[in-house]
Image (cartoon, rainbow, N blue to C red):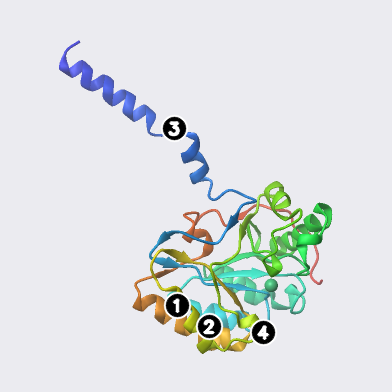
Amino acid sequence: MGFTTLLVASLAVSSSAVPLLNPIQAIQAAGPAAGQVITKCSSPGMIALAYDDGPYQYTQKLADILSNGGAKGTFFVTGTLYGCIYNQKTAVQNAYKAGHQIASHTWTHPHIGSLSASALTTEMTKLETALVNIIGVKPTYMRPPYLETSGSVLSTMKTLGYRVITDDVDAEDWNGKTPAQSEAKFQAAGASGNGHIPLMHETYQGTVETLTPWLINWAKTNNLKLVTVAECLGDAGGAYTNGTGNSQTAC
Ligand SMILES: [Zn+2]
């Protein structure tokens, strides 16, 4: 076998091997595994601003503040916690269309660590149906209310195909911290290491109007890209999947 034959043979082998993914690559291509707790981004140089408990009266304003700051955020929404999700249908649609990620925070925001798998499944599927009705797709990411991952939570999320997100920096807006106190927590956490996925709530005016602009500026000062949770996990195209809607327009 001459040199040319060898070269052609090795080229043929390498080119035919390119499209084939080994099992680890196939899992990575599919995004993070369902049913496992994820606390932060998979790479440095980014931050995934993430907000729970909406939609509410500030949803549109928050989406606009993020968009105007060149940021993408993630909204972990419920069906009924701060009023019916259909009441904020347009704001949710606008946030989705602007490229912010819409993810699940259950239908009624219960303590899911003590729910049966069946009751938890209903909590998830009711929100899925509403989101298919509102934005046309269902999410593959969720954050447990109260960050509860005990009981049947993880096994049920694995069954339903949900990536479970908690946090690595708690802004503690839910705990009465002022925006300045929350800012100090980010400064203490620092900008190095794999990107933060903070716990914040879009239901507080200070979080939307003061903390978020400060965080956008802080991220830019520290050369952090402001991305969705899915993107910060290398799964930019995997935030949603197809689902089945219905004719419901109210909770
Ligand atoms: Zn919550």
Query: Residue lying farthest left?
Result: 3
Q: CA distance from mark 2 to mark 1?
A: 10 Å
Q: What amino acid is at disc 4?
A: Gln
Label 4 belongs to which residue? 57
For discs 1 and 3, the disc positioned in front in the rendered view:
1
Which residue lies at the image location 73% right of the left edge and 55% below the top edge? 153
Which residue lies at the image location 37% right of the left edge and 27% below the top edge? 16
Q: CA distance from mark 4 to mark 2?
A: 22 Å
Q: Position of residue 126 (x, y in %)?
A: 78, 61
Q: Position of residue 51 (x, y in %)?
A: 60, 73
Label 1 belongs to which residue? 188
**The quarter of the picture showing ligand 1:** bottom right
Q: Position of residue 190 (x, y in %)?
A: 41, 73
Between disc 4 and disc 1, whose residue precedes?
A: 4
Say left or right for 204 vs 40: right
Label 3 belongs to which residue? 20
Q: CA distance from mark 2 to mark 3?
A: 46 Å
Query: Is residue 203 at all visible to an observer of this figure?
Result: no
Which residue lies at the image location 51% right of the left edge and 65% below the top edge? 228
Query: Which element is circle 4 on?
Result: loop
Query: Which element is circle 3 on?
Result: loop
Label 2 belongs to which residue? 182
Q: Position of residue 55 (x, y in %)?
A: 67, 76
Between disc 2 and disc 3, whose residue precedes?
A: 3
Between disc 4 and disc 2, whose residue precedes?
A: 4
Q: Residues within 10 Å of mark 2 (few under 14, many from 20)?
A: many
Between disc 4 and disc 3, whose residue precedes?
A: 3
